[in-house]
Structure formats: C-alpha cells, structure tokens
Amino acid sequence: NSLASHVQDFKSHSSHLLSVDLYFKGNIKLRVFVIYIPPPAEGVLRSDTIDLLIQQLILTKQAGFYHAICGDFNMHLDKYYPIYFNQPQIASKHIHRLFFHLLSQRYEDYTPINLSNSLGTFHRNDQITRVDYRQTRRVFKFDSVTDIQWTEFANKADALCDVLPSTFSSWHINQMCEYLQSQILKSANATLPSSTVGNNYTPKVPKDLEILTQHYRFLNHLMHSIRLLRKYPLTYSAAHEHKWSIHLHRLQNILQLYKKVFTFIPTLPLSLSSCRQDNFKSLLDDLSNISKSLREFHLLQEKEFQDSSICAHLDDRNNNFETDVSSFIDSTLSRTRRHITLDRVFIDHPTQPQLLTDPKDVDDAVINHFQNFVPIKSTPPISIDTLPDRWSSAYQPMDDVSSSIYDSLMNPLPSTNGYPPFLPLLTVKPLVLP
C-alpha cells in the first residue's frame, strides 16, 4: 500500500469508532474516521456514538487536521437533504444533530448513489438508497487470459504511459509507483477479462495452490492425449506437433517452478515424431512420474491449507467470543440462516381457484394459513377413560399405596461417602401427599 509509510498513529475511541492519522510532506495531516453507528433499536449506544463522533470532529478540526469520515451510519442522508434545505427548524433538532453538524460545517459527501438494479441488495418501496447496496470490486481472471489479450494489455499500457522519461525520473518514488499503478489498472480494465464481486469475497484457495491444481490438471489432460496417440497411432498429424511445441514450453516452466519437488528431472523431446519409435512409451512414463510427484505435492499443500484454515476459523471464533457473541454462538452451534421467498400463493379452491401475486395479498394469505391451518387443534380429554390404552394405563391411579415408602424420610443424611459434614444439620421436612 503506497499510503502505509504515511501512517503515524491510530486510535480506538470506542468499539464503534476508530481513527487513523496520516502525515504528508508539507506538514499536511489527515485523519480518517471509520465508524459504525448502531441502528435505532439500540438507542443509548447509538446516541453515545453520535455524540462521540461529533466531539472528535470538533477536536480534530481545532488540531488543524484534514479529515474524512467513512463507515456505516445506519441513516439516510438522501432523505435528510430536503429537510435541511426546506425545513431548517426540523433539520436542527437533536435527532438530526449529526447530519446537521456535517452539512452546516460544509462537509461534502463523495459517495454517489448507485441506482443499478443489479447491485441493489435490498429494495424498500422500489427505492435504492446509499445503505441499500453493497460496494463491489473487480477481480481479474488472469488464468483465462489469452496471448492476444496479453499483447493488447501490454500495448494499451505502453500507450497510456505517455509521460516523458525526463519528467518521470524527476518524480518521487511514491508518485512513480502510483502513476504506473493507475495506468496498468486502466489498461487491465480495458483489455483483460474480469468479474464483479462483493467486498467480502475471498478466494476459496490460495493462489499458489490454485496454480498448482491447474498445472496438475494440465498434466492429466496431456497424458490423456498421449494415451490416445498410443491407442490410435494413425491419428498422429502435424497438428499434434504444433500443440506439443506449446505444451513443451509449459512443461519446462512447471519443471523449473517445482524443481525442488522432483527427484529427477527428465529430458523432454523437442518433437513428438521422435517418440513414435517406442509408441510414446518413454514420454508417457516421464509424464506419469511428473504427474505423480505433483500429485503428492498437491496433497501436501491441500493438507497444509486445510490445517491453516481450521486454525484461522478457530482464531476467528475465539475473537468473536470477545467482540461478537452472536457470531460466536452461530459458529459454535454451526447454525446457518436459511429463508425462502414467497412471491406468489395458489389457493386451491374447488370452485374458485386463485393465484395471488400482490405482495400484500401474499402476506395476508400466509398469515391466515399459519394462524388457522398449521397449528394442531387439540382439546383436553373429558376423562381418563378416553385416553389411548398406553396412556390410560400410565395415568391410572394406584389402588393402594404402602405407607412403608415414607419410613426413610426422617432418617438423617449420612456424613460419609463424600457428603459434607454440615448436611446432617439440615432439617428435612417430608412432603406427604394425601
């Protein structure tokens, strides 16, 4: 991160407010606040967090810091704008004190509203607001990039880097890196395949293990092709030679990349025609040995990743015990949240069947169903004789009760066999049922 060298201090003001101080050349100081304001249901904590943020903003401004605020406000700034401009008396009320402070002190909002339906994660009355969509980021699919795309990417990057070498060499190293990074990203966005993912996206496996898996699959596909040539030698053609020249280059890269894994590095033929003498047997044996070594290494790497993942999840669970009890309980009980979305209801009436699609009608029908049809209607039995036999026999009163069952009730508690010595001092009052 090019900003890491500028970080001078960070402070946790509360469990919901954090600040980071960055110093730049020319005595420029920047303080970034990261905040989470609890929802209205947690009124006291929400109010305390808002007051703390306003207090820190005032102190930061007095200290001469540039500052920025980011995080989750659990508020709708878009709905407050009309109140601020058209109803100043309401805008200055205590409930709106945070937004009133920010706008009256000339703070600017640099987060645009994304009105794309594809990014909205929650819709309320067909409106998408700032807190109703999840920020996304782009992930490049480097494994599926073709040679043509790599060439286009390189040419595009060269064209974008149009700064004179004399000017570039006069820059500070940080400016050089930031300039190159921005131009490379512009070129990648224009030429390389990518996908849009959420900010909480994490790869399922480490990049090294993913690359190793791809190399292992490549070897298996190549061995399958060689086996087909052994089985059908007459299918050999010049196309196989062209493919082998490409595969040979990748094989050499694999041998170089994992040279510590192989006990013996074979010499691969430059052409397939030289392997036809023994019907590709030697080549297939060499590829099998390479594949076997990669397979063993792959299993070892998978086991290490599995162990590290388990340790990481255990650490997260231990941290949640102190910071997020709800997540700790969910992970401990291995509970997963599941839900279904009912967007239509079909009423199977004998004479007037009906399909409901209006959300309100669907809600009413679901509520009516669970209130009147799901519960098991039961009434207490009139007498014990109406119970099933296996229940009536269990609840039938006894004809006679021997008084000897109460003989031991007044006996003192023993002071041995592990009982504390003070227990015999307790007075035991038996409860005798009529």
Image (tube, grey):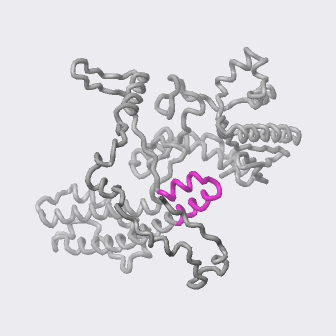
Which image quarter: residue 194? top left
The answer to whether residue 170 is visible is no
Question: In this rendering, would 65 be left or right of 266?
Answer: right
- The stretch of residues the image draws in magenta is 311-333
Furthest-top residue in this view:
86
Question: In this rendering, would 246 be left or right of 207?
Answer: left
Residue toward you, 157 or 58:
58
Which residue sits at x=67%, y=76%?
425
Which residue sits at x=73%, y=17%?
85
Which residue sits at x=12%, y=62%?
232
Residue toward you, 272 or 117:
117
Q: Is residue 144 above or below residue 99?
A: below
Residue 122 location in percent, x, y? 51, 32
Q: Main secondary structure of the magenta part?
A: helix
Q: Was residue 416 drawn as part of the magenta stretch in this picture?
A: no
Which residue sits at x=48%, y=44%?
153
Residue 429 location in percent, x, y? 59, 67
Furthest-bottom residue in this view:
416
Q: Is residue 402 above or below residue 196?
A: below
Question: In this rendering, would 292 be left or right of 418?
Answer: left
Residue toward you, 145 or 120:
120
Residue toward you, 376 or 123:
376
Question: In this rendering, would 354 be left or right of 127?
Answer: left
Residue 337 location in percent, x, y? 46, 46
Furthest-right residue in this view:
62
Which image quarter: residue 350? top left
Q: Is residue 148 above or below residue 131?
A: below
